[in-house]
Image: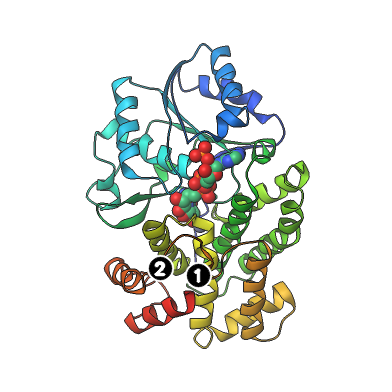
């Protein structure tokens, strides 16, 4: 095992009706609330009215920034930070999925610093302080509710990049699985895929063996593989929503990283390029890249892939593991090739150019430019 520090300051409020405790928590930070949300799902499922009533009950002064889109963009973050700064808000309240909460994390560090948000991603600025962030999660997928990461797109800079700071852990995150019942089938599947991918990025990371962390990875993936398909046939089932929501949080809150030097994250870096170019939902980008990446790495990581498959599927070869993983992604309705995505014309040269430009997948198991060509072929 590698040496490690376990640190996670987010208080997680999980379960039915936990939102009733929201006013009491917000009150600790102040009455001026910047409410950040997306493009309408919380109005449609009734959560918006519920939140507004809770905010009224504590006499909050509410400033809103809405319209955060999936695959969020830096321009929204700068505009929302300006609203927070002008109104000297005490707390940022993010209500939504990964896109909203990631945006709110950067908003919370940008408000006090007056720095354009992209400066953090370009490593031109470091945050010194943050407005406290409270999150209400509405989609089980990214784990952002209990981690310090945020991912934003900057189309002018041709990048979808990530930034992290210990200041960006939400102070509190509220997870009521009832409010994920309205997530459509496709995004529910992408969320299941994303949490599996996070577990795999940990599993294929760097460092000495970390057997307990490996077993946590198998458990999280097995939970997703057993209950994910059931949930997809019964989208309003509270018990199943709760299981998947909890699994998604555990997949990227540090738990599976104990005893490892780092995660792999190559597949994510390539997935981000697909999202940037074609606005592919994050989880769907990963189900295209993962099978291709594992095929490319089959000989280089043969024992590791075999071990994974043995624990997940009882399979005995790396080939079988890869086949089973791809079958699962297909079974839950996710794309496994770029050609499965309707309405786009993937351009291999353009994907290659952005892979070279962003040095994709060069963090742990480094891919070279021939590998890029090969993996693009495998994804087509
Ligand atoms: O626009 P809204 O109204 O929010 O609608 C969203 C959006 O259309 C909708 N939705 C959310 N909750 C819903 C709902 N629809 C019905 N009922 C609900 N309860 O679902 C769509 C997708 O939402 P989004 O927030 O984009 O999805 P997700 O949670 O998968 O977040 C994806 C973003 O997170 C980043 C991704 O790269 C991507 O930008 N990630 C963040 C990570 C992190 N911070 O740790 C790690 C991940 O690997 C990932 O990179
Ligand atoms: Zn992810």
Q: Could you classify mark 2 by the number of other residues whose Cα lies within 10 Å: few (under 14), some (14-19), or many (20 or more)?
A: some
Where residue 145 appears, x then y in whole percent?
Answer: 53, 43
Residue 350 vs 122, above or below: the answer is below
Residues under numbered marks 2 and 1 in contact, where contact means CB atoms less than 8 Å apart: yes
Q: Residue furthest left?
A: 124
Q: Which residue is mark 2?
A: 346
Q: Residue furthest front?
A: 343
Residue 8 in view, yes or no: no
Where residue 238 appears, x then y in whole percent?
Answer: 76, 41
Q: Is residue 180 left or right of residue 233?
A: left
Seen from the viewer's position, the closer of residues 200 and 96 is 96
Quadrant that contains the N terminus: bottom right
Q: Which residue is mark 1?
A: 339
Q: Is residue 301 left or right of residue 237?
A: left
Q: Residue furthest bottom?
A: 299
Q: Residue at x 49, y 56 (%)?
A: 282
Q: Residue at x 27, y 68 (%)?
A: 357
């Amino acid at each position: 095992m590698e040496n490690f520090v376990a640190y996670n300051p987010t208080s997680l409020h999980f379960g039915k009706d936990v939102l009733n405790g929201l006013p009491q928590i917000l009150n600790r930070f102040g009455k001026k609330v910047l409410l950040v949300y997306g493009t309408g799902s919380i109005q449609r499922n009734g959560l918006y009215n519920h939140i507004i009533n809770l905010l009224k009950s504590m006499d909050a002064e509410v400033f809103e920034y809405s319209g955060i889109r999936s695959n969020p963009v830096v321009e929204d973050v700068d505009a929302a930070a300006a609203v927070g700064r002008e109104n000297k808000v005490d707390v940022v309240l993010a209500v939504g999925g990964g896109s909203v909460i990631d945006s709110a994390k950067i908003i919370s560090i940008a408000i006090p610093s007056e720095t354009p948000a992209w400066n953090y991603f370009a490593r031109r600025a470091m945050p010194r302080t943050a407005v406290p962030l409270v999150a209400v999660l509405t989609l089980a997928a990214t784990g952002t509710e209990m981690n310090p990461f945020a991912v934003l797109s900057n189309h002018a800079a041709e990048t979808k990049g990530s930034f992290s700071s210990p200041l960006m852990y939400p102070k509190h995150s509220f997870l009521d699985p009832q409010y994920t019942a309205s997530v459509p089938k496709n995004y529910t599947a992408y969320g299941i895929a994303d949490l599996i991918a996070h577990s795999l990025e940990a599993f294929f990371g760097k460092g000495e063996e970390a057997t307990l962390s490996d077993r946590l990875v198998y458990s999280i993936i097995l939970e997703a593989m057993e209950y994910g398909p059931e949930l997809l046939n019964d989208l309003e089932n509270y018990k199943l929503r709760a299981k998947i929501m909890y699994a998604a949080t555990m997949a990227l809150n540090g738990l599976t990283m104990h005893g490892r030097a780092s995660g792999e994250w190559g597949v994510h870096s390539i997935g981000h390029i697909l999202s940037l170019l074609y606005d592919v939902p994050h989880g769907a980008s990963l189900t295209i890249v993962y099978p291709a990446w594992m095929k490319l790495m089959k000989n280089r990581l043969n024992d590791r892939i075999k071990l994974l498959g043995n624990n997940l599927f009882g399979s005995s070869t790396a080939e079988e593991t890869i086949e089973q993983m791809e079958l699962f992604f297909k079974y839950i309705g996710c794309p496994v090739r770029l050609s499965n995505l309707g309405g786009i014309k993937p351009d291999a040269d353009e994907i290659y150019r952005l892979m070279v430009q962003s040095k994709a997948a060069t963090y742990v198991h480094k891919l070279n430019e021939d590998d890029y060509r090969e993996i693009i072929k495998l994804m087509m």
